[in-house]
Amino acid sequence: MPVNAVESELELYYRMNHSFSDGRILNSMYTAPHPIGVRAHMRFIEANMGNPGLYPGTAEMEKSVVSMLKSLVSAGDDVTGRLTDGGTESNITAMWIARNLTGKKGVVFPKSAHFSLKKAANILGMEGREVPLDENYLMDLGSLEKAVDDSVALVIGVAGTTELGLVDPIKEIAKIIDRRTYLHVDAAFGGFVLPFMRELGYSVPDYDFSLNAVSSMTLDPHKMGLSTLPCGSHLHRMGSEENISTEAPYLTKTKQAGLLGTRASGSVASAYAVIKHLGREGYRNIVKQCLENTDYLVKRVGEIGVRPVVEPYMNIVSFAFENLDAVREEMERFGWALSVSRNPPGLRIVVMPHVTEEMIDDFVTDLKNVLAVLGEAV
Ligand SMILES: Cc1ncc(COP(=O)(O)O)c(C=O)c1O
């Protein structure tokens, strides 16, 4: 087919997609990547960190990004890490290292944990133990105590839960496990929010490597880091990665660590460019705006009598409705991309950098109409 005919087809497919510029996406933990990141990604589009000997420049950028990420989570010289394809791969990696180092199969995580942990347990032949939540929707410490025994390789807490954006009591979790197991913190989302909330004067509980007991963390540049995807990271102090390395005879390096072979690596350059360009001040301003917009959303939705299921802590909020699925369905007819939290049930909104006050006003207007049509008591 001639180029322009193919491109016309592509355009049709493109229009079938949602786009952040439509002003309708309220359920995504990813946002429009920063333009400098897009340019960097395109410049390094050929790079494949599965074969780093060919791409020493990209390999150096990866090291540099890892060291910038380490500075976000109070990591010292004993912490090492790598960029990954995202939170799922990072969580798999944490569990993989812990399983191989301890020879144990148990992994304990809260009911609020991202489903990637169950997926990882399945892949790795580990036994996932889900700990119930307390009345504040955080990992219940009494139940954690009962779940940890000699067969457990690691406990996982979440700093920025997927459904509600809450932070598990990592310090208290560390006390309970008392170094009997590794402790992994999934900060896939919160990793680019919490450090800046702290700088903005919010009270943020300890959740990172400043706690000696934290052995490993997930932190994703492709979520609130505004990098292009795929870009996650796994940082850890669990020894060398020898135990997750495989002989790779035909490549430029003889061993390959980690899960993936070929890795889309334009995003390494993207993360490098965005982090360098925005710096702490840039991210702080973005987080500030997202938190202000979250407050605005809660206020505007409150004006029509709808309350959050729990006071939002960061830029994720879930709203309670009697007829939740019907509200979501009707709102989707207006083009809104929404998701629900299941625990507790609510209409879940992630107030990412592309979500503006104007979008929120449009959303509230449509929501008011939908509630009137459904006769939902407010
Ligand atoms: C807390 C948490 N961990 C892990 C993941 C998985 O990340 P990814 O989709 O980048 O693999 C998510 C995704 O939303 C998440 O919210």
Image (cartoon, rainbow, N blue to C red):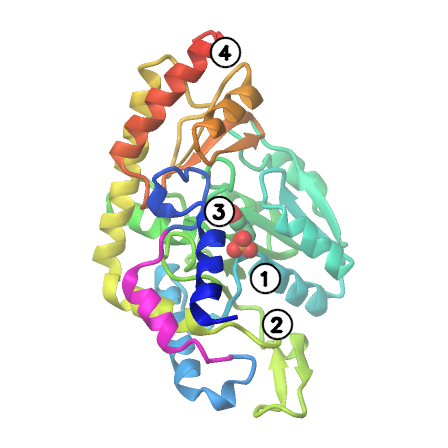
Determine which residue is flagged by label 4.
Answer: 374
Q: Residue at x 37, y 67 (%)?
A: 271
Disc 3: CA contacts within 10 A as few (<14), some (14-19) or many (>=20): few
Work out whether mark 4 precedes mark 3 in sequence or the reverse, and give the earlier one. Answer: 3
> Of the residues tagged 4 and 1, which is closer to the observer?
4
In this rendering, the answer to whether 158 lies above or below 318 is: below
Tag on residue 89? 1
Disc 2: CA contacts within 10 A as few (<14), some (14-19) or many (>=20): few
Task: Look at the numbered disc 1 and give the secondary structure of its residue.
Answer: helix
The answer to whether the beta carbon of the residue marked 1 is less than 8 Å from any atom of ligand 1 is yes
Q: What residue type is labelled 2?
A: Leu
Q: Which amino acid does label 4 sit on?
A: Leu
Is residue 273 in view?
yes
Q: Position of residue 27 (x, y in %)?
A: 46, 39
Work out whether mark 1 precedes mark 2 in sequence or the reverse, and give the earlier one. Answer: 1
Tag on residue 16? 3
Foreground pick, 91 / 157:
91
Instruction: Give the residues in magenta.
Output: 32-48
Q: Residue at x 77, y 54 (%)?
A: 151
* Magenta run includes residue 370: no
In this rendering, the answer to whether 362 lies above or below 70 is: above
Q: Which amino acid does label 1 sit on?
A: Glu
Number of callouts: 4
Relative to 10, 254 lies left or right: right
Task: Look at the numbered disc 2 and give the secondary structure of its residue.
Answer: loop
Is residue 67 in view?
no
Determine which residue is flagged by label 2.
Answer: 260
Q: Are marks 1 and 2 in contact (CB under 8 Å)?
A: yes
Task: Look at the numbered disc 3 and give the secondary structure of its residue.
Answer: helix
